Amino acid sequence: MNRLILERWRQKHRTVAYPAQPPALPDRLRGAPELNPDKCRADCTQCVAACPTGAITRVNGVLQLDMGRCLFCGDCQAACPTGAIRLTHDHRMAVRRREDLVVTGRERPLAVALDAKIKSLFGRSLKLRQVSAGGCNACEADTNVLTTVVFDLSRFGIRFVASPRHADGLLITGPVTENMALALQKTYDALAEPRLVIAVGACAISGGPFAGHAEVRNGAIALLPVDLFIPGCPPHPITILDGLLRLLGRLEDI
């Protein structure tokens, strides 16, 4: 027992200081994609062909990347002969509107806070019911890890609860399979109003690699109004935390 106590003392305080300090992210993190139109050749479609989910398209000659469909696999970056597309180390990707997930090379918008009335209800205490609507458990794992001592989600007044009757909103992962569609709808209906819906991961936003399959609904937005989109496959826990804090108005100046 004494040895365990000594080892814990040596490890010091484990909880990350974010947002007071920048997060310490792994070098291998694949964050927000960045497009450089000046480097992109109009006759080149190698990144479009390389993308496994069709997240990259050309619209009127302009290259676009949909983070809501992106798996952050890096195939596009590897395929681009001019370096016009790359995955940065930026963890900030959450947005309030689906269309804001489309990257074109212009400045990317980030999630804005709830309006004053709703924020007054949830700003200091937010209870969420997490629903895995057919997910692979990757987004679920990175969501659940927020409750550990490393991230300590509860210090922000945010908690996961077992019943939608006790929740202020849903945090949804997975592509929403046909087997889960009714359960998800009933869970949403059990929430008291006003209520929030947060879609975490490519599957919950667009269906991810399963988009277009007969057994999925291509994400939560097909059934429910979504208040916050957090892209990734899976998104890093800091990306999820960043999105939640922005929604509550805790990161407006960062």
Image: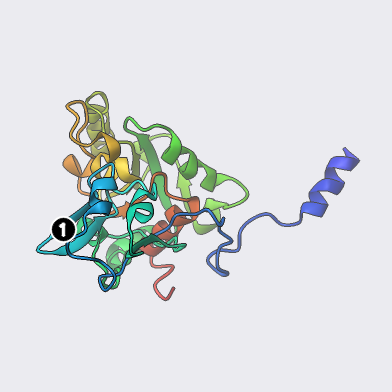
Answer left or right for 126 relative to 229: right
The residue at 26%/52% (across/down) is 46
Q: Nearer the viewer, residue 141 or 233?
A: 233
**Camera-nearest residue between 13 and 135:** 135
Q: Where is residue 168 drawn, in percent x and y?
A: 35, 48
Q: Residue furthest right?
A: 2
182 and 38: which is toward the camera: 38
Q: Please say if 55 is above or below 185.
A: below
Query: Furthest residue to the left?
Result: 60
The residue that disc 1 covers is: 58
- Amino acid type, callout 1: Arg
Q: Can residue 145 be seen in the rendering of this structure?
A: yes
Vertically, is 189 above or below 100?
A: above
**Element type where label 1 sits in the image:** strand
Q: Residue at x 25, y 70 (%)?
A: 37
Could you tell me residue 175's position as x and y percent?
A: 28, 36
Relative to 102, 151 lies left or right:
right
Residue situated in front as seen by the camera: 222 or 187 = 222
Q: Which quarter of the picture shows residue 87?
A: bottom left
